[in-house]
């Protein structure tokens, strides 16, 4: 059963790959000498595109490398991953973009597309070398991990990025409101005695970005987690603002209750919120306000996580659990159809990032595709991740939906659920 939202296809077909491209999708195809994969009873989908991941390269090979992150991606069904700029050194100049592309060519098993920083050193003061980073191959701009606090700097970034028609991805957080906090501010933070971050910290910046986008150029809002953010984005989109956004599996699956046991794997930025926020995120996914599901894969070492909640690093790994969480929590519950869900992980990011030949299985597209057993049940075991990060709040969860094959440019990189290399 091939599901290709970009060509509005959901049906049982054969698919022929030749020279790294999709040659034909049709009934009863024959091709002499071709390798045949029998995928009856399975889903064949365009390879997933994660427009938001942290691969920690350069700088923190103990947390992740392009080699390990790309293998985690392949196992999770992602054939294209955009890696964020908050590395060490940050991706704020063309040399780092060039390094990432070269490293990816040498050791990645999926496509790696670098996101360049908006500001020099991610300091929020001066614009980075955006034009030269774009020329070197950056597909978007973001200071993700940190907000661009100065509206005048964000304005210049939007005006500048507009000439390349590349999105600026905004990490929405008012750093003054969030300062010192480590989880969502509310009843739970009060009860367990952790300093809170008010939801307004995200929402105020989402509101600012919608106003800036209307005047100066398109914005993609990263990791939407709050009900008011969804409401503000919905309204702005209705008014024709050039705005897109994403959420992540943890924001439609978990609430702030996950932090009650002081499990530092539930410490993430923006913080997990209330049941009402989760319901609003789900409504936003359903009505199309939220365009994309991304992972915000943020690997950290055990040393960085096995400390007091306040001291712990922020973030969780997502590449190897995202698709199964989408299938289990959104499709299995009939919140989204498979086609809608797959669209948010393929066609939508390809459209926003203007990735030609990606996110679709149309004839002529890159042969990036996955075969998924939608019914297979499995138990998350972080110890077995290909990612170096073990920091998942989903360890031990039973999920549905298993990636059997991942094919990148016609090359099989995952076979029978295992890496080939
Ligand atoms: O939880 C997070 N971790 N959120 C971010 O925005 C950055 C990320 C990281 O780099 O660890």
Image (spheres, grey):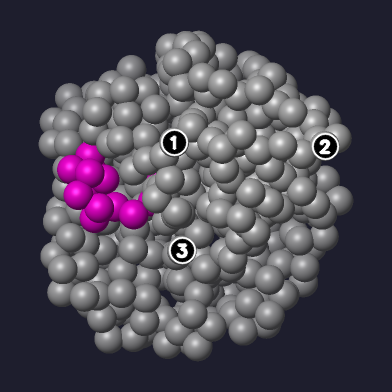
- Viewer-nearest residue: 62 or 105: 105
Residue 199 in view here: no
| Spot occupied by residue 167 in the image (x, y as percentages of width and height) | 46, 71
| Spot occupied by residue 288 in the image (x, y as percentages of width and height) | 25, 53
Q: Residues within 10 Å of mark 1 (few under 14, many from 20)?
A: few
Q: Quadrant of residue 388?
A: top right
SS for tag 3?
A: helix
Q: Residue at x 65, y 59 (%)?
A: 364
| 323 relative position to 149: left or right | right
Task: Read off the residue under disc 3.
Answer: 351
| 237 relative position to 158: left or right | left
Q: Nearer the viewer, mark 3 or mark 1?
A: 1
Structural distance between the alpha carbons of marks 1 and 2:
24 Å
Q: Which mark is residue 246?
A: none
- What segment carries the magenta color? 281-293
Q: Residue at x 76, y 61 (%)?
A: 101
| 101 relative position to 248: left or right | right
Structural distance between the alpha carbons of marks 3 and 1:
23 Å
Q: Quadrant of residue 153?
A: bottom left
SS for tag 1?
A: strand
Q: Is 53 located above or below residue 159 in the figure?
A: above
Structural distance between the alpha carbons of marks 3 and 2:
35 Å
Of callouts 1 and 2, the N-terminal one:
1
Task: Read off the residue under disc 2.
Answer: 32
Residue 237 in view here: yes
Of callouts 3 and 1, the N-terminal one:
1
Q: Residue at x 50, y 75 (%)?
A: 166
Q: Nearer the viewer, mark 3 or mark 2?
A: 2
Of callouts 3 and 2, the N-terminal one:
2
Asked if disc 1 and disc 2 are in contact, CB closer than 8 Å, the reply is no
Task: Read off the residue under disc 1.
Answer: 11
């Amino acid at each position: 059963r091939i599901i290709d939202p970009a060509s509005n296809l959901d049906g049982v077909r054969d698919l022929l790959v030749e020279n790294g491209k999709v040659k034909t999708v049709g009934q009863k195809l024959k091709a002499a000498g071709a390798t045949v994969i029998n995928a009856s009873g399975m889903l064949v989908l365009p390879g997933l595109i994660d427009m938001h991941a942290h691969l920690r390269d350069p700088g923190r090979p103990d947390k992740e490398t392009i080699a390990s992150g790309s293998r985690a991606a392949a196992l999770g069904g992602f054939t294209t991953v955009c890696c964020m700029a908050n590395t060490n050194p940050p991706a704020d100049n063309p040399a780092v973009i060039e390094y990432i592309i070269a490293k990816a060519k040498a050791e990645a098993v999926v496509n790696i597309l670098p996101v360049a920083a908006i500001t020099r050193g991610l300091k929020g003061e001066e614009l980075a070398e955006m034009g030269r980073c774009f020329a070197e191959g950056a597909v978007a701009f973001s200071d993700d991990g940190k907000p661009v606090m100065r509206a005048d700097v964000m304005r210049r970034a939007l005006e500048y990025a507009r000439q390349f028609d590349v999105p600026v991805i905004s990490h929405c957080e008012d750093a003054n409101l969030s300062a010192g906090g480590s989880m969502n501010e509310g009843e739970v933070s009060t009860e367990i005695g952790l300093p809170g971050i008010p939801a307004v910290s995200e929402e105020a910046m989402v509101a600012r970005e919608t106003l800036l986008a209307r005047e100066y150029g398109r914005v993609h809002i990263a990791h939407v987690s709050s009900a008011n953010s969804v409401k503000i984005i919905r309204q702005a989109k209705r008014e024709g603002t050039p705005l897109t956004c994403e959420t992540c599996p943890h924001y439609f699956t978990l609430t702030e209750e996950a932090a009650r046991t002081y499990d530092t794997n539930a410490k993430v930025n923006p913080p997990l919120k209330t049941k009402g926020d989760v319901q609003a995120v789900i409504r936003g996914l359903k009505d199309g306000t939220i365009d994309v599901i991304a992972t915000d894969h943020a690997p950290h070492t055990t040393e960085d996580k096995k400390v007091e909640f306040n001291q712990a690093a922020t973030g969780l790994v997502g590449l190897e659990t995202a698709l199964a969480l989408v299938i289990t929590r959104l499709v299995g519950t009939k919140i989204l159809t498979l086609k809608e869900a797959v669209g948010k992980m393929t066609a939508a990011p390809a459209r926003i990032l203007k990735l030609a030949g990606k996110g679709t299985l149309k004839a002529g597209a890159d042969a990036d595709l996955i075969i998924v057993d939608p019914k297979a049940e499995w138990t998350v075991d972080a110890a077995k991740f290909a990612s170096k990060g073990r920091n998942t709040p989903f360890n031990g969860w039973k999920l549905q939906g298993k990636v059997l094959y991942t094919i990148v440019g016609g090359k099989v990189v995952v076979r029978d659920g295992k890496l080939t290399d």
